[in-house]
Amino acid sequence: MKKFGRWVVQLRIPILILSLALLVPSFMGYVSTRVNYDILSYLPKDIETMVGQDILVDEFGTGAFSMFVAEGMAPKEVARLKAEIEQIEHVEKVIWYDSVMDLSVPMEVIPDELYEAFNSGDATMMAIIFNETTSADGTMEAIENIRRVADKNCFLSGMSAVVTDTKNLSEREAPIYVCIAVLLSCLVLSLTMDSFLIPFIFLMSIGMAIVYNLGSNVFMGEISYITKALSAVLQLGVTMDYSIFLWHSYQEKNQQIPDKKEAMAEAIGDTITSVVSSSMTTVAGFIALCFMSFTLGMDLGIVMAKGVVIGVIACITVLPSMILVFDRALRKTKHKALLPDMKGIGGFVTKHYGIFIALFVLLLVPALFGYKNTKVYYNLDETLPKDLPSIVANDKLNESFDMNATHMLLLDAELPDKDVKHMVEDMKKVEGVNWILGLNAIKGPSVPGELIPSDLTDSLENENWQLLLIGSQYKVASEEVNRQCESLSAICKSYDKKGMLVGEAPCTKDLIEITDKDFSTVSVVSIGVIFLIIMLVFRSVSLPVILVSVIEMAIFVNMGIPYYTGTEIPFIASVVIGTIQLGATVDYAILMTTRYRKERISGVEKKEAVAIACQSSVKSIMVSALSFFAATFGVGLYSNIDMISSLCTLMARGALISMVAVIFTLPSMFMVFDRVIMRSAFKNKKDKNHSIGQEAVSL
């Protein structure tokens, strides 16, 4: 490792030139990476709802539609607006009264049920069908153009409108997230480090690694907006430790070795050994997300695992090169660190370890209860501000038409008309169904089939499939709409086994079922992999149990707090936060355990070894946790997208809770289980003579 360190020191200028040059293709890759704003598109492609979505695209040239409400407009004005909307690119068809009848024919001739479904007071509703999928760029562009031509008393609802507003809000806020994270990180580092300049050196190095990571996402084709919004902030938070360790190691070596280049070479060697070991648990936590069936986990997991690896590489190449180049300026800007040394905390914890163990046991039941009962929401509308156009439109749809969701029903084109009619009659009896629109619903004595325009027929029927739209008064992700979807699907299958119910509500129902399973899978995988890594690092079975138990308890407390505060959290938080908190903060426990084990191997008595381990680790743990907190807390407060705000708030709080747990509970565990640890970890002379001091050191 020292040879590699000397190589970096020798080539520091070429390394800096290359690192700056790589920013250009990385930035190009970043701007070329498409961002996906449709969370439901990450559902498994082989489930029925997603297969149905593909059929809509392949057979009908559409995968998206919106309901458009116009208030206070005369029929002729509505007809003119409808004609304008139909001319907008990517709008396939607009279905309204004049799609079936000429305006000269009174609306009263259409069936009462259909008339009442699409008219309420001075408001009328039309269905807009797009020729691309919900989150396609063309669909979002069409949404924006429809809003430009529409009157202020017009409201465009539906998932595509929500996705468009999410995109606009996310693009507006994302750069601010990074600025907030950088400013708060600078503040924390200024308080905890001994140089005014070093925080900026850290942030420049990590900033380069973030740009490299974001640029390399171009090979993935696209990433989710959640990944885009969180990756920079999260990478900053979890990789800052590595920079801090290099700096501390360099300062320590420079006191022993006057030659700064040789001191840096030694520091790089130590950093590689410790940081690679430390980063393994963090990478493992993110890789565990890739085991989710809901592939948003894989999206976030790959990007963040890649970001940690790139962060490690930048820490042992770019950062030492920068430190050496700016060495004189760094020395001139040195100051005393403002973070207190916390003297005596090791002795305090060992003296009162029984109290901390008792607190651990007492907290366990309420923490687990809160963790198990925290309410989770799946309705994506809930993640957005209530004044966004799409949310206002959805509320208007509910207020004027008692309608919250629209399902699409795909049926075999060969299904006899009489069966379709009977099926529709059965479905109308399902609680919460407002109306069902299809060719059979439009046809009747007053509207013979031959009078229906061919373009309308093509929009609802082809040689393979026929399409029905079902209006529901229930909100997406509610228990009522989930039961309704089950009933409608059962009725559909009784008439047509090939039939499929698709749309936002059925997809969200699948999302609920899939993420429930993913939660268990990800938890087991992350705990199992991290347990294995710790076991291999320390060659012990008992230590992984203790370390993982302490961090898991911190996770239970963190995830249980929303239950006691009456806060609902987004579904994705319940799946990924535990894994991220475990992977990112178990390093605190590894740091303290390394020192404790080193002291015990050296023959130091139990109580003194625990006190030394706690005392020597506390400052590094606090710096690490506060850095992670700083990178995420401000974003949690600022973001108007609750999906992002909740994730950042939980990560920030989790870092502090893990910090407290490791400082007070972990050494107490060592006091209680020291005999078990000694018997299970040190069994032969080779172990006793082996120093692991640098093997798992982490900040």
Image (tube, rainbow, N blue to C red):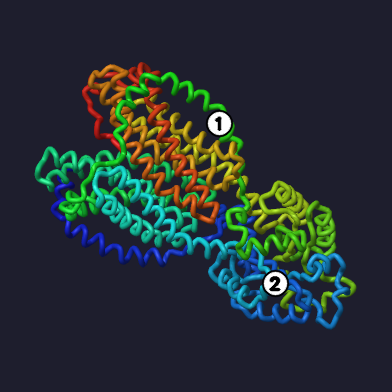
> Where does label 1 land, which residue?
368
Residue 649 versus residue 129: which sits nearer the camera? 649
Compared across the picture, whether 688 is left or right of 569 comes to left
Determine whether the residue tagged by mark 1 lies in a helix, strand or loop: helix
Residue 76 versus residue 89: which sits nearer the camera? 76
For the point 40% across and 59% down, the residue is 217
> Where does label 2 land, which residue?
153
Q: Quadrant of the N terminus?
A: top left
- Residue 698 falls in image quadrant: top left
**Label 2 or label 1, whichever comes before in sequence order:** 2
For the point 59% across and 58% down, the residue is 385
Compared across the picture, whether 473 is left or right of 530 comes to right
Rendering coords of residue 359 (x, y %): 48, 24
Rendering coords of residue 11 (x, y %): 15, 55
Determine whether the residue tagged by mark 2 lies in a helix, strand or loop: loop
Rendering coords of residue 158 (x, y %): 65, 63
- Residue 83 falls in image quadrant: bottom right
